[in-house]
Image (cartoon, helix red, strand yellow):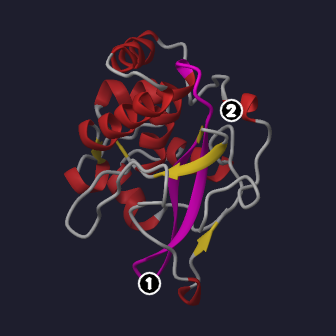
Amino acid sequence: MATTDSVLETAPPENYLAGNEFIDVDDQSVRTLALTLRQGADSDASFAKAAFEWVRDEVGHSYDVQDSRVTLAASEVLAQRVGLCYAKSHLLAALLRSEGVPAGLCYQRLVHGDGHVLHGLVAIYLDGAWRRQDPRGNKDGVDAQFSLDSEQLAWRVVPSLGEVDYPRIFDSPAPCVVEALRGAADVLSLYDAGLPTSL
């Protein structure tokens, strides 16, 4: 899937800069990390790459590291250093927005066990176009990389399996994601039998 404005459904880029309850850009810990990452960057693109790699590599994916804690807001993810794909995406979006780089949330529907699951990504507006990035964290069989040319996501959808690349870029988490995480006491149990299956 190409990531151009003609493919992704978005509002104007400036609509993807504000903070909210889940992408809490004004949290002091988020601001501090964003400023630290910005200091080592010479452009918005290099800052975005640094932020992406930090979240991908320094925050464990809950299932990969078998951590049952539930995180949702960016500041929670940063404090706990763990989260599902959605939560990690919230942190990346918050870091980028706090330094003036438009960032939104987008989703894929992927095969999961005997059914499907909703997977969370981030879309970043750089050099006049939206580009999707996947900070979920790498492991055997998963090699997501920051790229402004061709997408290097964790997974490519297979439509014949009922998988979907949803074109909409959200400025706040999809309601089904918030409902699932807010209602969970153990994210590992949620991962096995309670994650959203579609938008």
How many numbered circles does the render carry? 2
Q: Tell me: residue 95, above or below residue 137.
A: above
Find residue 152 and report its image quarter.
Answer: bottom left
Which residue is the extreme one toward the bottom?
A: 160
Amino acid on which disc 1 is placed: Asp
Apparent side of residue 151 relative to residue 144 in the rendered image (left or right)? right
The front one of 199 and 134 is 134
Specify whether 76 is left or right of 171.
Answer: left
Gap in Å between the C-alphas at discs 1 and 2?
35 Å
Which residue does the numbered mark 1 point to in the structure image? 114
- Which residue is rendered at x = 76% and y = 54% of the image? 9
As helix, strand or loop, the secondary structure at mark 2 comes to helix
Residue situated in front as seen by the camera: 42 or 108 = 42
Residue 6: x and y in percent read 76, 58
Dots 1 and 2: beta carbons under 8 Å? no
Q: Is 109 covered by the magenta stretch? A: yes
Quadrant that contains the C terminus: bottom right
Q: Nearer the viewer, residue 18 or 80?
A: 18
For label 2, the residue is 16
Q: Residues within 10 Å of mark 1 (few under 14, many from 20)?
A: few
What's under tag 2, amino acid-wise?
A: Tyr
Q: Is residue 197 visible?
A: yes
Observer-nearest residue: 69 or 129? Answer: 129
Placement of 115 over or under 39, stated as above or below: below
Query: Where residue 185 sits: x, y (%)?
Result: 40, 44
Q: Quadrant of residue 19?
A: top right
Majority SS type along the magenta span: strand
Residue at image position (64%, 53%) is: 176
Whether residue 179 is visible here, answered yes or no, is: no
Which residues make up the magenta segment? 98-124
Q: What is the quadrant of the N terminus in the image?
A: bottom right
